[in-house]
Image (cartoon, coloured by chain):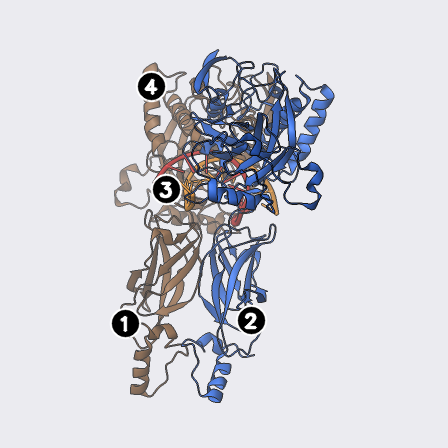
Chain colours: A blue, B brown, C orange, D red
Amino acid sequence: MNMNQYYDLDNGKNVMFMNDASSTSGYSSSTSPNSTNRSFSPAHSPKTMELQTDFANLNLPGGNSPHQPPMANSPYQNQLLNNGGICQLGATNLINSTGVSFGVANVTSFGNMYMDHQYFVPAPATVPPSQNFGYHQNGLASDGDIKHVPQLRIVEQPVEKFRFRYKSEMHGTHGSLNGANSKRTPKTFPEVTLCNYDGPAVIRCSLFQTNLDSPHSHQLVVRKDDRDVCDPHDLHVSKERGYVAQFINMGIIHTAKKYIFEELCKKKQDRLVFQMNRRELSHKQLQELHQETEREAKDMNLNQVRLCFEAFKIEDNGAWVPLAPPVYSNAINNRKSAQTGELRIVRLSKPTGGVMGNDELILLVEKVSKKNIKVRFFEEDEDGETVWEAYAKFRESDVHHQYAIVCQTPPYKDKDVDREVNVYIELIRPSDDERSFPALPFRYKPRSVIVSRKRRRTGSSANSSSSGTESSNTWMP
Amino acid sequence: MNMNQYYDLDNGKNVMFMNDASSTSGYSSSTSPNSTNRSFSPAHSPKTMELQTDFANLNLPGGNSPHQPPMANSPYQNQLLNNGGICQLGATNLINSTGVSFGVANVTSFGNMYMDHQYFVPAPATVPPSQNFGYHQNGLASDGDIKHVPQLRIVEQPVEKFRFRYKSEMHGTHGSLNGANSKRTPKTFPEVTLCNYDGPAVIRCSLFQTNLDSPHSHQLVVRKDDRDVCDPHDLHVSKERGYVAQFINMGIIHTAKKYIFEELCKKKQDRLVFQMNRRELSHKQLQELHQETEREAKDMNLNQVRLCFEAFKIEDNGAWVPLAPPVYSNAINNRKSAQTGELRIVRLSKPTGGVMGNDELILLVEKVSKKNIKVRFFEEDEDGETVWEAYAKFRESDVHHQYAIVCQTPPYKDKDVDREVNVYIELIRPSDDERSFPALPFRYKPRSVIVSRKRRRTGSSANSSSSGTESSNTWMP
DNA sequence: GGGGAATCCCC
DNA sequence: GGGGATTCCCC
């Protein structure tokens, strides 16, 4: 029996509570003694045991948390409701909403407009309620009949790439999940707005798989009071507070393989219990859940997640009722993985090669997978149109420990050019068609026989001092 | 209470025994219920628990093993005595010993002689006892007085580099610890001979630290009957069997960091108990042992070990009495570590550079540590004498993820040479002065101004078609 | 924020 | 036998 506390952001003070439940998984925050999660608990290494204590301390017993549905086994009873607190900007009034419809083409550009102009307005202003939140549905032609249906819109997507951290890495600070348009200043964060609704509501953010409408085993955490609180994260919105929910200071914890099934099962079960608003699942339901979890866990993409946003109203009896269909963010890719990380050419062994190609070229690159990488040469005209492309030649064994590629340059399309040709080199990862950026410049040099012929004809010297190199001499057709 | 069995190589059959002791560490083979080791046991992850079961099954209860001293807590009561078994060549009769002293200068050459001529002799021959084992002491001048003292000699050193494997890697087969002179055929193995003794004896091999005469926390294992048996390993030798002990099929298990202290403590304690031939250690002794272990564990080199060979005779009362001072093998280095692994240049971005130096050169290399690596250029004369050396210039940040080095070539000593100069490039690891092998050839090219001067003077064309390159032209002093 | 060491997995 | 993925640690 331990005394624990949590910081109640609604009331702005610490709340003490008793806790005698043992945590079962590294991330579990369920404390119900009859939790069905218990049966999945694996043994833990000493280090893991230590760490999970951190999470266990976050547990809140049912009944202590305000505004929660009365479910003893609710997965969310232990979760902090954040509204206007220090760590998370719970509800920023949408000053930008002047009552006129923006009629913007898509969420992203709306997000940009919003941020560009109004993002740092400090305090909630008092906007006439009647003017607020008359949003159109994305300017689609068919939106007439759903014009006044409550709807969630993403106004700021999360960044596309982010390093997922293991639990063991969650000591220090490592930077949080910013918005796609975040800069040093202003920083942005994933952000949604609830449209066409004017009562109090809760906006929830949780981590989902990208291939299924199902939770992801990884954890979306928020650092709060020296603790990492797991998803889902709820923010209160209302007429007074505004209907924008900005999710600040989140991180993504990479669930270790041995816990994937367990964590996924727990999350799926929690959602099911919540949706059905009942205490326990039937044996049959549990069995199906297990089977489904097994299938999903087997080929879940561990290096890609997305955010799921949901909106609920809380009935007088405490029940949470969905207000709008969930919306999903763009994919967030694990920056650390060779399968999803940033592609980058750090250096070329030389900036030029002959038009005949087959020059050996070494590229120093950031981590790549030898089975999933190509080296593309391409030429653009003045308008940026691609007028030529070709791929360098190399085998898997020419990829040196993921960090260097030894390749042969492809021949240029025209072996008889009489001047240097400026082209570019980029990496391509076929699996997701990712490119390195920026493309690096490379110059094709004409054959020396062509250069001297031109010289004889025109009487001019080559316009490049370095034309007609040794190697060019050897590329006689 | 489980039934277990081990294969008794002395009797050539499986022996059943009861086992109700739980194993404490990943490698522990001690089963005594009052073992003091118990207090160090850490919790284990599920995976670890599984694996240690493998080891636990090897436990032999005291009293079941023949030829062992009567110590309930003996660390070696659970160890297989190997003589003439399938996996380990327990005792090869030393046919080569004709009774005359070889008087060889060192153990290694003796080892070579032995192997070259006699290694594959199939069956033990019956050599007149009186003629056997009259070895000299390494041919030292001062060896007269110890000529007939029993002595261990290493006749085949272990290989210098070997990949240490984690316990989790011990499924498949990964090649065993061969002798320094091992080839595809003939393979050799670490091997010692006991000289100046003609009774039955046991030769023991165990893993030691290189900086101290103390055991290493890593495990020297022998695969036997689908199990990895930990060190020490004992082989029986005698007049009939010969006095050569060849340790076949050994591997080195890299103890995970969290078990270093525990494993080291156990090994040290086992040795102490064995040496003192008593059941338990006093409280004071245990305390000292702990402190000493703590000190040793703190800065033990985890990437370097050596073999310790010892010889014992077994008294009629079962006591083991040392016959000769222990001898230690050369260091065995972990091939997988950047600190001790093989240095190798896989490729150069170009084979030539100008005499003025400062040409950018990329080396693709096997794993190096950026804080512990140098690139040495050197020139040898016809006799192989080094006539010039210099180091390439680069910063730590020029080492690309341990696998490539971007450096500037050093200037050649003579900026006015009028012909190409052939030199070599090698990597050097300062910490252990290790070199890459073989050194790669590199050619310095004369400045073009020198070449044309020579041409004018001598009327001859440069003897290299590629002298006077573009870049050479730019190295004007 | 990132590089690399330690550990584990698999071709 | 070896490369690389996974997990962890630390500058």
Q: Secondary structure at mark 3?
A: loop
Chain of the residue under label 2: A
Q: Are marks 4 and 1 on the same chain?
A: yes
Q: Amino acid at mark 2?
A: Tyr
Locate the C terminus of chain B by quadrant: bottom left
Q: CA distance from mark 2 to mark 3?
A: 74 Å
Q: CA distance from mark 2 to mark 4?
A: 75 Å
Tell me the quarter of the picture where residue A204 sits.
top right
Binning the other alpha carbons within 10 Å of mark 3 as few (below 14), some (14 to 19) or many (20 upward) gives many
Labelled disc at residue B287: 4
Tell me the quarter of the picture where residue B462 sits.
bottom left
Locate the N terminus of chain B by quadrant: top right
Task: Identify the residue shown where x is 32% and y is 82%.
Answer: B452
Whichever of labels 1 and 3 marks the residue nearer the N terminus, that label is: 3
Image spot of residue A415 (x, y percent): 56, 76
Q: Nearer the viewer, residue B287 or B312?
A: B287
Q: CA distance from mark 4 to mark 1?
A: 67 Å
Binning the other alpha carbons within 10 Å of mark 2 as few (below 14), some (14 to 19) or many (20 upward) gives many
Is residue B63 shown left or right of residue A317?
left
Q: Which residue is mark 2?
A: A412
Q: Which residue is mark 3?
A: B135
Q: Amino acid at mark 4?
A: Gln
Viewer-nearest of discs 1 and 2:
2
Whichever of labels 4 and 1 marks the residue nearer the N terminus, that label is: 4
Is residue B86 shown left or right of residue B97?
right
Would you place residue A11 above or below residue A366 in this image? above
Q: Which residue is mark 1?
A: B415
Image spot of residue B259 (x, y percent): 44, 28
Check whether the beta carbons of the residues at disc 4 and disc 1 lie within 8 A of each other. Answer: no
Would you place residue B291 above or below residue A438 in this image? above
Viewer-nearest of discs 4 and 3:
4
Image spot of residue B113 (x, y percent): 43, 50
